Structures are given as C-alpha cells and as structure tokens.
Amino acid sequence: MLRTVAIQLDRERRLKYDLNAFALLKERHDINLFKADPERLQDPVAVRAMLWAGLVHEDPGLTVEQVGQWVDLGNIKAISETVADAMLAAQKRDVEAATPSPPFVETGPTTGANSMS
C-alpha cells in the first residue's frame, strides 16, 4: 500500500502522492514532479497545488482555493516540509517495490511429490 502522511489543516488529513496526484499537478498546474526543481517548495503557488494534489484522493471536491485558506505565514514552512516528507515517503515506497523478493527459496533436495518448500 502507498504510504500516506498525516497533516493538520482544518482537521487531520492524509497526504498521498501517487501517479494520479502527479498527473493532476501536470495537467492542471503544469508542475512536473518527475523533474527536479529545488525552488519549488519556496513557490507559494506550487506549494498550494502540491498540497491540494496530495489531499484530493480523500476529498475529490476539494479546490486549491480551499486548501489555500488553510495555509498562512505561520504554518507555510511546516506545511512545505510535510509535503516534502510525504513525497519522500512515496518515493521510498517506490524504491522498495523496485526490489522484489524472489518467489521462492531453495532449501535443498526434496523427496516425494508434496515436499515443496
């Protein structure tokens, strides 16, 4: 299962960055998260869009304007850091998934028809 990260806004919500979130950012805000941009988390328009894209999975009717009302100068730094953490959590999940376990482990010679390990 894809990791989610808790964030306190109007209530506790969960950020989730899956392919749908990445696609929404590209389609609606022209933000491509597959291209590195260290300045992105310092851009208020980008932070608002990334926050929205991570939340829309649990509330499809959510708008970027609603999300923007939950962020001000007192919490924007913490929110930006939480968005970054959530994206890293999604990336770590992808790294773990890219290294599959072998389907079986040989334990030595077997005898009989029902002695598979």
Image: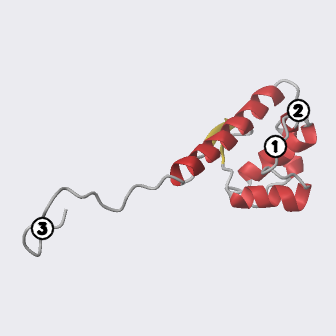
Pointer 2 residue: 42
Label 3 element class: loop
Mark 3–mark 2 Cα distance, whole angstroms, equals 60 Å
Q: On the rendered structure, is 104 left or right of 96?
A: left
Query: Nearer the viewer's eye, disc 3 or disc 2?
Result: 3
Label 2 element class: helix
Tell me where residue 31 appears, x and y as whole percent: 87, 51
Tell me where residue 98 appears, x and y as whole percent: 54, 54
Which labelled disc corresponds to residue 56? none
Pointer 3 residue: 115
Mark 1–mark 2 Cα distance, whole angstroms, equals 13 Å
Q: Sequence order check: which comes first, mark 3 or mark 2?
A: 2
Q: Could you say which is closer to the camera, residue 70 or residue 49?
A: 49
Tell me where residue 99 appears, x and y as whole percent: 49, 52
Task: Check disc 2 and give the amino acid type.
Answer: Gln
For residue 78, which quarter of the picture?
top right
Pointer 1 residue: 36
